[in-house]
Image (cartoon, rainbow, N blue to C red):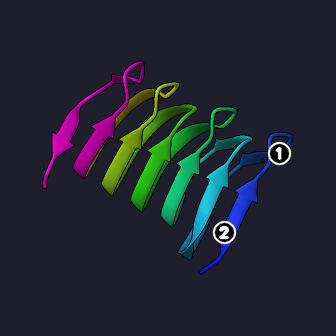
Amino acid sequence: MTRSVIEEDLTIDGNVVSKDGDIDVKGKVTGDITSRSVDVHVSGKVQGAITADTVTIQGAHSGRIECSELSLEKNAEVKADVKAQTLSSEKGARLVGKVQITG
């Protein structure tokens, strides 16, 4: 299992795929992300779809999320349609969009 980090000074325009790995987003991604797990840190921004087993959002995301486990931490700002088996949210997290919990 590998962990790939998109650092704060890095912007990626395009899709990111890591089939069996983990992706930490501290910078900006404009495109879709597919991975085993995705962590969007406080400084991170994603515009596009996220598809993963586990997704943790601390920063900003707009697009679509499809996952097994979604965690929204207190600084999360999400504008997305969400399909997840489980959803946990800390006080202060913001989510705008259609939410479907399948668990």
- In depth, the one of 71 and 28 nearer the eye is 71
Tell me the number on the disc at residue 10: 1
Residue at figure coordinates x 71%, y 43% from the top left: 26
| Residue 99 located left or right of residue 33 | left
Residue at figure coordinates x 41%, y 24% from the top left: 93
Tell me the number on the disc at residue 35: none
- In depth, the one of 3 and 64 nearer the eye is 3
Circle 2 sits on which residue? 3
Q: Give, as a three-letter code, the residue at label 1.
A: Leu
Q: Residues within 10 Å of mark 1 (few under 14, many from 20)?
A: few
Q: Secondary structure at mark 1?
A: loop
Q: Which residues are magenta?
A: 85-103
Q: Position of residue 41 (x, y in %)?
A: 62, 40
Q: Position of residue 61 (x, y in %)?
A: 51, 34
Spatial CA span between label 2 and label 1: 16 Å
| Residue 45 located left or right of residue 89 | right
